């Protein structure tokens, strides 16, 4: 299957998912203007903060769709007016947004750059691996070596961990990739490689294996990372992903770690 065909099939699923997340229609991401909706707890949406979203926003590179508490709409209309959607994610605009949110006890969370599969990659065997499913992952909760592969110190019912794959050097773990089901059949991949085993291709190897397994199951794998985390972004690209959207949200100031 050609690259564009592969990306298109996952892109269509993404639009449906984002429409649940941001309480909009898939067509809103192709609009000429930025779109503002009232936030809602739609069944099947992704949720990274408790309760109804105070503000979330996403762009596919054109306009931006923002879902927010109705109290913010007047400001958001003025803030986003006559501005290209992708520019709303630039620092000067985010500073303005962050300043407004502080009056409500919120602040902007980090911006995440998100990836979808775009090509088939069949990884040549690099090392011995071990697969873990569901409850087999339990012993690794709270393990400080794997903050990305297993993001939470205990099971998270909203985003359950489904699969992990471990790279082994004898009996020693070199790295782990894991996925959490952030929405029904929408699996986010995270990767951790121990420092002494980095720059050997282990990260891309594990992510490729896990991505392929998720696709075989009929689910959608996706991958997210910070704007400046080039090492992580390179792993995504080598594993057959490409940039697909950018998103961020407001979080309560009292929830700061």
Image (cartoon, rainbow, N blue to C red):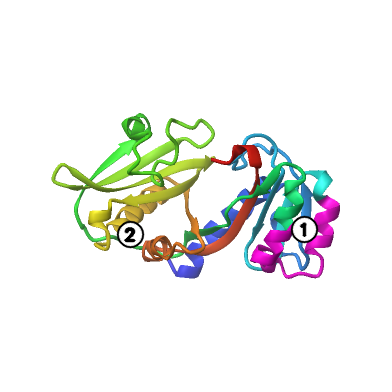
Q: Residues within 10 Å of mark 2 (few under 14, many from 20)?
A: many
Check if residue 30 falls in the magenta segment.
no
First of labels 1, 2 by sequence position: 1
Image location of residue 193, percent across then percent down:
30, 52
Q: Do the CB atoms of the residues marked 1 and 2 lie less than 8 Å apart?
A: no
Q: Is residue 54 left or right of residue 202?
A: right
- Residue at the location (37% across, 53% down)? 212
Image location of residue 9, percent across then percent down:
53, 59
Q: Is residue 153 left or right of residue 7?
A: left
Write down the quadrant of residue 146 in the picture: top left
Q: CA distance from mark 1 to mark 2?
A: 36 Å
Question: What residue sits right under mark 1 in the picture?
Answer: 35
Near-viewer residue (65 or 105): 105
Write down the quadrant of residue 244 in the picture: bottom right
Image location of residue 173, percent across then percent down:
22, 45
Write down the quadrant of residue 254 in the picture: top right
Is residue 102 positioned above or below 6 on the image?
A: above
Q: For numbered disc 2, what is the local secondary structure?
A: helix
Q: Residues within 10 Å of mark 1 (few under 14, many from 20)?
A: many
Name the disc covering residue 188, or none: none
- Residue at the location (73% across, 40% down)? 40
Check if residue 82 falls in the magenta segment.
yes
Is residue 52 positioned above or below 122 on the image?
A: above
What secondary structure do most residues of the magenta stretch adopt? helix
Residue 251 visible to the viewer: yes
Magenta segment: 73-96
Image location of residue 70, percent across then percent down:
82, 45
Q: Is residue 209 left or right of residue 67?
A: left
- Residue at the location (60% across, 50% down)? 109
Question: What residue sits right under mark 2 in the picture?
Answer: 204
- Residue at the location (47% across, 35% down)? 160
Q: For numbered disc 1, what is the local secondary structure?
A: strand
């Amino acid at each position: 299957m050609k690259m564009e065909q592969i990306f298109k099939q996952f892109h269509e699923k993404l639009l449906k998912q984002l429409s649940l997340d941001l309480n909009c229609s898939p067509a809103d991401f192709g609009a000429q203007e930025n779109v503002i909706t009232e936030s809602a707890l739609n069944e099947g949406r992704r949720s990274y903060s408790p309760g109804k979203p105070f503000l979330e926003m996403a762009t596919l590179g054109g306009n931006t769709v923002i879902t927010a508490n109705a109290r913010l709409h007047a400001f958001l209309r003025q803030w986003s007016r006559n501005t290209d959607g992708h520019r709303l994610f630039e620092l000067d605009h985010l500073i303005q947004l962050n300043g407004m949110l502080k009056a409500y006890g919120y602040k902007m969370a980090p911006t995440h750059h998100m990836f979808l599969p775009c090509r088939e990659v069949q990884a040549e065997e690099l090392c011995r691996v071990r697969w873990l499913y569901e409850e087999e992952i339990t012993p690794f909760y709270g393990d400080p070596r794997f903050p990305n592969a297993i993001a939470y110190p205990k099971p998270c019912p909203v985003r359950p961990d489904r699969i992990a794959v471990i790279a082994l050097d004898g009996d020693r773990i070199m790295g782990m990739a894991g996925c959490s089901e952030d929405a029904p059949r929408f699996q986010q991949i995270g990767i951790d490689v121990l420092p002494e085993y980095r720059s050997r291709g282990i990260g891309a190897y594990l992510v490729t294996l896990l991505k392929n397994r998720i696709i075989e199951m009929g689910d959608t794998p996706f991958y997210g990372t910070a704007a400046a985390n080039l090492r992580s972004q390179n792993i995504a690209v080598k594993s057959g992903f490409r940039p697909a959207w950018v998103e961020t949200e407001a979080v309560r100031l009292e929830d700061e770690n």
